Image (spheres, rainbow, N blue to C red):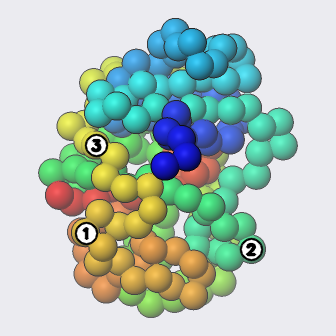
């Protein structure tokens, strides 16, 4: 082992707003003092109840990914395990998430160019959204589907599968994430 993972960092236009969004989705504490970094308008953190720290770094020229468009790759995504997809969806949408076209996320076939070109392009603000209680969700994986049932598409995503059990969204800064039924 060379070292320990300190945090996962997401580039975004508004670090504190995105930290609040994920606090409402996952629970945890936004901007807890931590000797490892300073907190300011350029850097915000979320210490999740399960231990992992998500950090949010301002990127002035942030260009969100457009999953599953390989010209604008997702780079990574979070799978969030939930017991009730419908209830979790209602909560993340209320917080400012955008659901990607169901034809893209659940059809098991490659999407058409019109669907791909708009996927994840909308960015909305989640500043002050949510009550911070989370939805009983945990980060399941940052590298693939929770159950490993996803199949890799030509677009390089692991979120295209032949059967339901997950849904793909973008957070308010345009990063894709999946709600995965546990």
| Residue to which mark 2 is pinned | 71
Q: Are the residues tagged 1 and 3 within 8 Å (C-beta)?
A: no
| Above or below, 170 relative to 127 | below
Q: Residue at image x 38%, y 42%?
A: 92
**Quarter location, residue 144:** bottom left
Residue at the top extreme, as displayed: 33
Q: Secondary structure at mark 3?
A: strand
Query: Which-is-in-front pick, marks 2 and 1?
Result: 1
Q: Quadrant of the C terminus?
A: bottom left
- As drawn, is 14 to the left or to the right of 97? right
| Separation (CA) of disc 2 from disc 1 | 27 Å
Mark 1 / mark 3, whichever is N-terminal: 3
Query: What residue sits 31% from the left and 86% below the top?
Result: 162
Residue identifier under label 3: 138
**Residue 130 in view in this figure:** no
- The correct choice, above or below, for 151 with respect to 59 in the image is below
Residue holding disc 1: 147
Measured as percent of width and height from the top left, residue 62 is found at: 77, 45
Compared with residue 119, is residue 45 higher up or lower down, i.e. above or below? above
Q: Nearer the viewer, residue 81 or 101?
A: 81
């Amino acid at each position: 082992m060379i070292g320990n993972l300190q945090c996962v960092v997401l580039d975004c236009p508004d670090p504190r707003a995105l930290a609040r969004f994920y606090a409402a989705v996952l629970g945890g504490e936004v901007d807890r003092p931590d000797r490892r970094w300073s907190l300011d308008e350029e850097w915000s953190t979320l210490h999740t109840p399960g231990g992992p720290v998500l950090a949010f770094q301002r990127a002035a020229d942030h260009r969100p990914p457009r999953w599953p468009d390989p010209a604008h790759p997702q780079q990574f995504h979070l799978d969030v395990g939930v017991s009730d997809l419908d209830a979790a969806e209602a909560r993340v949408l209320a917080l400012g998430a955008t659901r990607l076209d169901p034809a893209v996320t659940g059809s098991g076939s490659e999407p058409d160019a019109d669907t791909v070109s708009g996927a994840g392009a909308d960015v909305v603000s989640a500043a002050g959204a949510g009550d911070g209680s989370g939805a009983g969700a945990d980060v399941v994986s940052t590298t693939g589907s929770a159950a490993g049932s996803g199949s890799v598409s030509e677009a390089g995503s692991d979120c295209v599968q032949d059967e339901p059990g997950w849904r793909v969204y973008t957070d308010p800064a345009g990063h894709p994430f999946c709600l995965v039924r546990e």
